[in-house]
Image (spheres, helix red, strand yellow):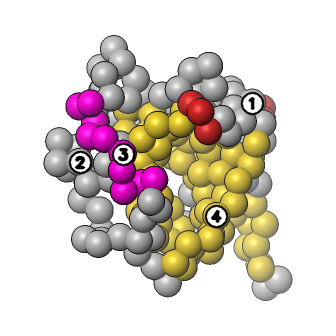
Amino acid sequence: MPFTFESTEIAGLVIVTPRVFSDARGFFLETYKKTDFAAGGIPEEFVQENHSRSSAGTLRGLHAQREPAAQGKLVRVIEGEVFDVAVDARSGSPTFGRWVSVTLSADNRQSLYVPPGCLHGFCVVSDEAQVIYRTTSEYAPALEYGVQWDDPDLAIPWPVREPRLSDRDKTWPRFKNLV
């Protein structure tokens, strides 16, 4: 199989490592293959793809979408490096309120699958980064929600103290106020 799938402590949150074929010309890898992903525990269909470019110190997140359009996300970096975080916000989950971080980079070529109901965010640690992510539901602004990136109850060790944030990301409530 051209991928390895590594489960994390949060159910459904999976680190995907592709097999890379390199030679004097460069490299080739598959970034997604429906049958392999289904066999690896990610059977979802992806319906939208997004691409962002951000400069060093930019932090995007933490956000998600509510039902009926909760999004699963398959996130990967094609330039640079990010500190990527997912927080389990699924009520009733045994890992509710816990988070996992992973370094995604153009060099390691890994992807992270963030299941629906988990908040997602990332911080750019290189000079700039380009992130591509596929989603299982289309973007629905009226269903989007988020939490403070620096919520003391989550205590995520972000690699930046004063990130560059959107106006929206500056105003999200604390995690404990979601429910």
Above or below, comparing residue 94 to residue 18 in the picture: above
Q: Which residue is labeled 2 in the image?
A: 151
Above or below, comparing residue 158 to residue 179 in the picture: below
In the rendering, which numbered label is found on residue 52? 4
Which of discs 3 and 1 lies nearer the camera? The answer is 3
Q: Which residue is labeled 3 in the image?
A: 172
Above or below, comparing residue 33 to residue 38 in the picture: below
| Quadrant where the C terminus is found in the figure | top left
Q: Residues within 10 Å of mark 2 (few under 14, many from 20)?
A: some
Q: Which residue is labeled 1 in the image?
A: 45
Q: Which x, y percent locates residue 58?
A: 45, 70
What is the spatial separation of the Cα atoms under label 3 and label 1, in whole angstroms? 29 Å
Which of discs 2 and 1 lies nearer the camera? The answer is 2
Secondary structure type for disc 3: loop
In the rendering, which numbered label is found on residue 91? none
Q: Earlier in the sequence, mark 2 or mark 4?
A: 4
Q: Amino acid at mark 3?
A: Trp
Q: Amino acid at mark 1?
A: Glu
Q: Residues within 10 Å of mark 4 (few under 14, many from 20)?
A: few
What is the spatial separation of the Cα atoms under label 4 and label 1, in whole angstroms? 21 Å
Above or below, comparing residue 157 to residue 146 in the picture: below
Q: Earlier in the sequence, mark 4 or mark 1?
A: 1
